Amino acid sequence: MSDSNTTEIEQGIGSELDHFVVRAPKKNRDAMIQLGKQFSDIVRKYGGPNPLYFQLNNTETPMEGITNIAKTVSANQNEDVWLQLTFYRDRKQRDEVRAKMGKDERMDPINRQFMELITPGSMIMGEFVHLKI
């Protein structure tokens, strides 16, 4: 149920967000896409939303005084910067989906392959809660 100040977009994305930023060699792009599809299928199987994947398309400094994320995560010209966003209705849904995924035997191989595809030490993760502003 939403209050009168909640937009349709806010209702659709929920109140919890997991985000991951990683660097991966460009040569691993196709394998990363395939792995993302497998991961998304598992998330949806357990009632979670479809994760959104983004690839940084501009490594130039956007404006004076602002640092491009590629520099912050130390990406080089042979690497892509990936962003994965997974929105959950609330913390309860997130915890339930994570618990079910943790018991799925497909997750260990997916996690191992993911760690082999990304640049070691490059993963940044955060859990965010939606602010009603």
Image (cartoon, grey):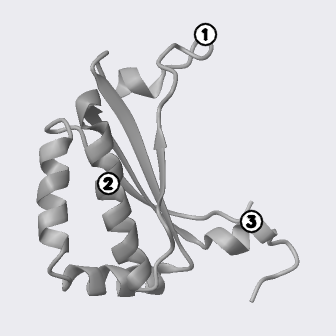
Which amino acid is tagged 3?
Answer: Ile
> Residue at label 2?
34
Q: Nearer the viewer, residue 19 or 35?
A: 35
Which amino acid is tagged 1?
Answer: Glu
In the image, taking residue 4 as reference, residue 124 lies left or right, namely: left
> Residue at label 3?
9
- Disc 3 versus disc 1: nearer the observer: 3
Q: Is residue 97 visible?
A: yes
Instruction: State if disc 2 and disc 1 touch (CB < 8 Å).
Output: no
Q: Position of residue 58 (x, y in %)?
A: 52, 21
> Residue at label 1?
64
Q: Position of residue 99 (x, y in %)?
A: 28, 85
First in residue order: circle 1 vs circle 2: 2
Tell me which residue sits at (20%, 83%) in the image: 104
Question: Which of the image's four quarters has the N terminus?
Answer: bottom right
Pointer 3 local density, CA inside 10 Å: few below 14, some 14–19, many at least 20: few
Pointer 1 local density, CA inside 10 Å: few below 14, some 14–19, many at least 20: few
Task: Tell me the quarter of the picture where residue 15 sits.
Answer: bottom right
User: In this view, which residue lies farthest toward the right?
Assistant: 4
Q: Nearer the viewer, residue 23 or 131?
A: 23
Q: Is residue 74 visible?
A: no
Q: Position of residue 118 (x, y in %)?
A: 21, 41
Tell me which residue sits at (55%, 19%) in the image: 66
First in residue order: circle 2 vs circle 3: 3
